[in-house]
């Protein structure tokens, strides 16, 4: 058993806290600061399941865009274009995914990061 091994990863839009890293899954908390958004992106392999814990998230999934709040859960299958945005305040999400953290194809990015 292991305790206290949370990895904080700074991001230009806020930060991630990785609380679980196993052969078949990764668990993390995403904190998106007000006025920031993640890349418009997709994953070739990674499959994600997320739930909004706090705040109002502007969510783009494929061709659909909607604003969702705490308790809203959703999944993102590989090759689905998506983006998360915190327009009115800080947003906190929990994410459980397959372990391919390197698998990010950025289509647009507000912070000048390149796609893979």
Image (cartoon, rainbow, N blue to C red):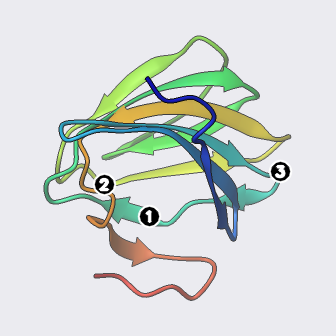
Q: Earlier in the sequence, mark 3 or mark 2?
A: 3
**What is the crowding at mark 2: few (fewer than 14 residues within 10 Å), some, or many (at least 20)?**
some
Taking depth in this image into account, of 29 and 112 the one nearest to the observer is: 29
The residue at the point 81 percent across, 41 percent down is: 90
Taking depth in this image into account, of 29 and 40 the one nearest to the observer is: 29
Is 2 situated left or right of 111 in this image? left
**Residue 23, image quadrant:** top left
**Residue matched to label 3:** 34
Is 23 situated left or right of 19 in this image? left
**Residue matched to label 1:** 40
Taking depth in this image into account, of 31 and 25 the one nearest to the observer is: 25
Q: Number of callouts in the render?
A: 3
Q: Which mark is residue 28?
A: none
Q: CA distance from mark 1 to mark 2?
A: 7 Å
- Vertically, is 10 above or below 54? below
Is 109 situated left or right of 104 in this image? right
**Residue matched to label 2:** 81
Q: Are marks 3 and 2 in contact (CB under 8 Å)?
A: no
């Amino acid at each position: 058993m292991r305790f206290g091994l949370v990895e904080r990863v700074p991001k230009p839009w806020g930060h991630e806290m990785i609380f679980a890293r196993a052969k078949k899954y990764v668990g993390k908390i995403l904190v998106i600061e007000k006025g920031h958004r993640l890349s418009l992106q997709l994953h070739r392999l990674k499959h994600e399941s997320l739930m909004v814990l706090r705040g109002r998230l502007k969510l783009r999934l494929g061709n659909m865009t909607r604003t969702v709040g705490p308790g809203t859960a959703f999944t993102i299958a590989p090759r689905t274009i998506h983006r998360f945005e915190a327009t009115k305040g800080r947003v906190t999400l929990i994410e459980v995914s397959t372990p391919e953290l390197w698998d990010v194809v950025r289509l647009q990015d507000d912070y000048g990061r390149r796609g893979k």
